[in-house]
Amino acid sequence: MNRAAELPTKVKDENRRKQQLIAELTQLRQRAAELEASATDRQRAEEKLRLSHYFLQFANRHTEMPSLLYEFAVEVQRLTGCTAVGVRLLDDEGNIPYLVYKGFSREFYESESSLSLKSDGDMCRRVVRGLVDSSLPLFTPGGSLCVNSTTLFLANSAQLEKQVTCDLCHGFGYESVALVPIRLGERTLGLIHLADPRPNVVTPEQVEMVEVAVMLLGAAIDRLRAEEALREERDRAQKYLDVAGAILVVIDADRKVSLINRKGCDILGFREEEIIGRDWFDNFLPARVKDETRAAFEGLMMGTVTPFEYFENPVLTRSGEERIIAWHNTVLTNDIGDVIGTLSSGADITEQRQLWKKMVEYEELSKLKSNLLSAVSHELRTPLAIIKGYSTMLLDYDRKLRGNEKNEYLRSIDKATDRLTELVDHLLDSLRMEAGLLKLEKHPTNLAKLMEEVAAEARLRAPNHQIVLRLSRRLPTIEADPRRIRQVLDNLIDNAIKYSGPGTRVVISAQRFGQELRVSVTDQGIGIPAADLEKIFERMYRIEERLNPEIGGIGLGLAISRGLVEAHGGRIWAESEPRKGSTFRFTLPARPSQQAGP
């Protein structure tokens, strides 16, 4: 009895264990399936990530739309193994033409290329518009069409709206067809068309991979379109800049040229690509103004210099010519107000400035001639009147005049004649210098001996002045025109006598300083104001009209002296203090190998 009762219990326990084992096995199988699915999903995710990275690099290296689309079609063809791949892009008028196709026949391209969103009933239009039902097995969650047998699709099309694309593809022998939309955010830019005569070539998994690539393609297309729009806008702006009659140049904070128009290129003589990116100050300004202009610009960038709307400065052309430009400037700032550069428009005023200079020179020359005529007529009148008067006296009253009176009249005529000769010589020398016809007859000259002769003659001309000669020992021989050096000394000594009173000293001295001789003439006269020290060597500049109107002269002596000294390779200047006298100095190159003494 007991054994009979135990048997059913054992059977029940065995069945319960079996059921438990079956349940555990089922759970293990489910878990295995989940792990397998998870591994597959992970593999797919990794593959999508790898594909994304590859197509990201691929898309970013292209700068032109045709090459981007063609190589993308080649890559999709390689990825999917499809025979034919085409790329359609939506235009502004709603058309969806093929821009690139590979593997499709010319006949197929021509029959398909005229599609437009304005028509209904075509699968391409539905995919582009996003009018698809992703719950149907024909479509992916990404909105792509995937048909792996157009024969079966069209056989069941009685239940569906007629689809021209699949019908047309089937008519050209394509069994596998996929349409993948090219999107960027909410916008659809076009689609990718894949086709193959074999069935089941384009799987939904492959279409998902293509969708990943197409997402990056959409970003690349948008980037290239934006760059093209920017280029067109820049080219349009450049055309406006090029037709402008002024130079337009933008200089950034690093002093480099970031924009210049055709007018600027023409004036500088460089091509645009030879100017853009180069330092404006180092390459296109003369050396003499480069540092000052650069410092002003850098001060402007740092805010330490007040912006200047207008200024003039020269630019340096390729040929080395300087052109004067009148600039109008605008300071460029960023969104937060920082100065980032300047925009300058300039006009070439070189010819205007040259014309203005000629006009000024002409006015100065006219004034000079007028002053010269006035001075010459005045200076001529006095000696001519003396000559005429005393000559008439000698002719009319010869027998009535005593001997000493005749001699006095003759000496006056002689002095007046000398004055006329000096005046004519000064006029001729001035004209020769102006015309560049003054010639020097240089030869070795003993300056000490020449100065002794000049001082002796000065003592005869001015017996009421103390003419003092001070010479350093062993002055070197110089290469000079002695007649012209004598003329310079006579001019300076006569000026010293003219502007100093009787009984005062006029000191003539000479010393050697290195490779030059320095000659000085010092007086104790009325002196020269500091403002006039530079001007006294200009032609027709007569300070005596203000200091002492009774002193004669036409204002050519010092101008001629400067021309003669500079023709010898020397320089001349004056030092003075009003009411204390003046010193005129000039230098001459020395000949160190030969010396002579007094």
Image (tube, grey):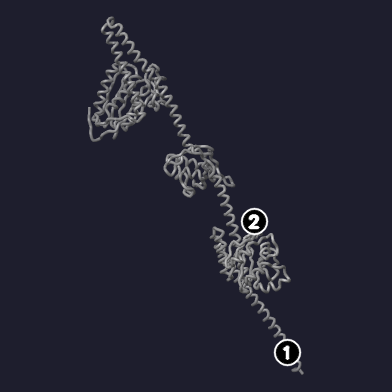
Q: Could you say where residue 3 lies in the image, as x and y percent from the top left?
A: 74, 94
| Residue 96 sits above or below residue 386 on the image | below
Q: Nearer the viewer, mark 1 or mark 2?
A: 2
Q: On residue 11, which mark appears?
A: 1
- Location of residue 51 by image quarter: bottom right
Measured in 3D between alpha carbons, the distance from the residue under mark 1 to the one under mark 2, in whole angstroms, is 80 Å
Query: Residue 425, can we see it?
Result: yes
Residue that protrudes farthest toward the front in the picture? 107
Asked whether disc 1 touches disc 2, contact meaning CB atoms under 8 Å apart, the reply is no
Q: Which mark is residue 153?
A: none
- Asked whether residue 303 appears in the rendered view, the answer is no
Q: Where does the N terminus fall, quadrant-wise? A: bottom right
Return the mark for residue 92: 2
N-terminal of the pair, mark 1 or mark 2, is 1
Element assignment for label 1: helix
- Between 116 and 372, the residue placed more toward the observer is 116
Nearest the viewer among 122 and 383 is 122
How crowded is the residue under tag 2: few (<14 C-alpha within 10 Å), some, or many (20+)? few
Q: Is residue 35 above or below residue 482?
A: below
- Label 2 sits on a secondary structure element that is loop
Which residue does the image show at 60% across and 59% down from the upper left?
A: 219
Is 185 situated left or right of 585 in this image?
A: right
Quarter containing the C terminus: top left
In percent of width and height, residue 533 lies at 39, 26
Choose top left, top right, bottom left or bottom right for residue 170. bottom right
Front one among 370 and 214: 370
Say which amino acid is labelled 1.
Answer: Val
